[in-house]
Structure formats: structure tokens, C-alpha cells
Image (cartoon, rainbow, N blue to C red):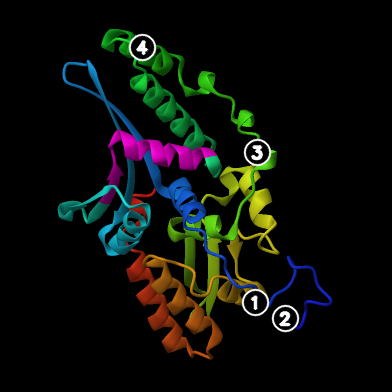
């Protein structure tokens, strides 16, 4: 048992010994909240609609998209070598329905626009699936929805966020692209470790939920005690290239590295992170 279990709350405990009950679907929703795109296109003389769900990553992180495809059991992966990108996409109607059902069960909530884009995407999907409407009637209804704009389609509060909750699996998925483990120079003789959640201050609900999991303000963290907690809490958790970044960062945090070793570690992590911001949404 954790030594502090008898004196601290579960939230405050720094030992992070509770085993991870990994839930792929919650992880996938967290990953989508950080990186997902809902694409709506009109084709063939403006009489046909194309819907596509996409996840885009730097080509260095292609393994995480194969991990997603393997677990979902559908979708396609294409590499854009000229742009150093890899794209996972879903466009078949039966597969889109499964993904939409998943997002109904585990809502997107990191950013208001994520859920709004999803809601508009789903609304158009349901219109296209209606058998009682002609092509012309479907187009008219879709044009009407698009003309109104997503803000008039739904109020974010209707998501009933108070009944939603963030899980560790969701947070891991979100941090696969929005987490940043890095080292920073402080003068000519000192290098410190830091952890940052990108976009943390964009959603108050997200802040509230993360604060229930992490026992401090995680926007940018450099407290050694809190970083040790992070190092233990997320050990063996990440599925993509974030796992390598995290392991290098965590190992250097726990070992008594000298300045030269820390500088080498900093350069290595920065190389791993190159190109990440190019495709983040």
C-alpha cells in the first residue's frame, strides 16, 4: 500500500501507485479532443456531400494512428511524405455511425468548437441518412443548417457537462498531442524540467476536471515534487511517440544528470518535438 494512503486523500497522494485501468475508447476521445477534425465537403456539382473524420499526425508519430485503427477495426491511413504527415480517416457511413455513437457516449469537451463541429457533422450525417427525403430536400436542409451556423444549432451548456467527467484514459489520450515534457535552460549552468498542458486555459470545465486528477495547477509545472508525481502517474501510459519523449524526460528527471547530460537530453527531446505544432488543431 502507498505510504501516504492513511494520511492523504487519493488526490493528494504523490505515490501514484494505483494501477491504470486503460479504456481505449476514453483514450480515443481524449486524443480526438486534441487532434480530431470533422470534414464536411460538397462534391459533384454541389449535389453530393462527403463526410470524413480525420486525425493528422507528424509522420514520426504514425504508430499511434495504427494503434487507433487496430483497436477500432476500421478506417484508412495515408502518408503525405512531402508534408511529413500521416492521416487516419473514416468516411464509410457504417463506420462513421460507430464513431458518432462513441462521441455521444463520451462527449468532446476540451474546447467548445470541438463539440460544435461534431454536432454539426452529426446533424448533417443524420439528414443524409434519411430515406424520406429527396436529394434536393436533403441539400436544402443541410444548407439551412450551415447557413444558421453552429452557434445557433446548439448551446454548449446543453451538453450537460456537470454529468460528464474526465478519466485518466481520456487525459492520456489528450496529452498524446497536448502534453509537453521538456527541459529549459536557466542561465549558463542550470537546466530544469518542466511539464505543460497546451490549451489548458481554453476551457474552464477542462481545468476543473483535470484538477480532480492532478493535485496542482498543471498548465506549466516545474515543481520537483509535482514532476515526480507526473513521472510516476503516467509511467507506461502513452501509446505514440509521446511515450519515448516522456521516458527520456522521466529518466533524466530521476537520475542525477550533470549539466552536459541534461543539455544533451534537452536537444534530444526538442528533436522529437519538431514539427508537432504544424498539424495540431
Residue stretch in magenta? 87-104
* Residue 161's disc number: 3
**In the figure, 236 relative to 36: above or below?**
below
Q: Secondary structure at mark 4?
A: loop
Quarter of the rendering occupied by the C terminus:
top left
Between disc 1 and disc 4, the foreground one is: 4
- Judging by the rendered image, the residue that carries numbered circle 1 is 17
Name which of mark 4 and mark 3 comes first in the sequence.
4
Looking at the image, which residue is at 38% across and 65% down?
240
- Judging by the rendered image, the residue that carries numbered circle 4 is 132
**Distance Cα–Cα, label 4 vs label 3:** 34 Å
**Distance Cα–Cα, label 3 vs label 1:** 29 Å
Residue toward you, 34 or 131: 131
Coordinates of residue 25 in the picture (x, y in percent) = 48, 52
Task: Give residue 107's quadrant in the image.
Answer: top right
Quarter of the rendering occupied by the N terminus:
bottom right
**Distance Cα–Cα, label 3 vs label 2:** 33 Å
Amino acid at each position: 500500500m502507498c505510504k501516504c494512503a492513511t494520511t492523504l486523500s487519493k488526490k493528494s497522494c504523490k505515490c501514484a501507485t494505483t494501477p491504470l485501468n486503460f479504456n481505449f475508447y476514453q483514450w480515443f476521445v481524449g486524443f480526438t479532443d486534441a487532434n480530431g477534425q470533422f470534414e464536411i465537403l460538397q462534391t459533384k456539382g454541389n449535389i453530393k456531400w462527403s463526410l470524413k473524420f480525420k486525425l493528422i499526425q507528424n509522420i514520426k508519430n504514425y504508430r499511434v494512428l495504427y494503434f487507433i485503427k487496430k483497436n477500432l477495426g476500421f478506417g484508412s491511413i495515408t502518408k503525405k511524405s512531402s508534408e511529413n504527415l500521416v492521416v487516419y480517416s473514416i468516411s464509410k457511413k457504417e463506420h462513421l455511425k460507430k464513431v458518432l455513437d462513441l462521441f455521444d457516449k463520451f462527449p468532446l469537451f476540451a474546447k467548445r468548437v470541438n463539440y460544435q463541429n461534431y454536432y454539426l457533422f452529426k446533424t448533417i450525417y443524420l439528414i443524409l441518412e434519411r430515406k424520406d427525403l429527396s436529394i434536393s430536400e436533403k441539400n436544402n436542409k443541410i444548407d439551412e443548417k450551415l447557413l444558421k451556423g453552429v452557434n445557433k444549432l446548439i448551446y454548449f451548456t446543453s451538453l450537460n457537462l456537470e454529468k460528464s467527467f474526465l478519466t485518466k484514459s481520456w487525459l492520456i489520450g489528450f496529452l498524446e498531442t497536448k502534453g509537453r515534457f521538456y527541459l529549459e535552460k536557466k542561465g549558463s549552468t542550470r537546466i530544469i524540467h518542466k511539464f505543460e498542458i497546451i490549451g489548458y486555459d481554453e476551457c474552464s470545465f477542462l481545468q476543473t476536471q483535470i484538477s480532480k486528477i492532478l493535485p496542482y495547477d498543471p498548465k506549466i509545472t516545474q515543481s520537483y515534487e509535482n514532476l515526480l508525481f507526473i513521472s510516476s502517474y503516467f509511467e507506461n501510459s502513452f501509446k505514440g511517440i509521446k511515450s519515448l519523449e516522456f521516458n527520456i524526460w522521466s529518466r533524466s528527471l530521476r537520475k542525477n544528470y550533470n549539466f552536459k547530460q541534461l543539455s544533451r537530453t534537452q536537444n534530444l527531446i526538442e528533436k522529437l518535438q519538431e514539427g508537432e505544432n504544424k498539424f495540431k488543431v
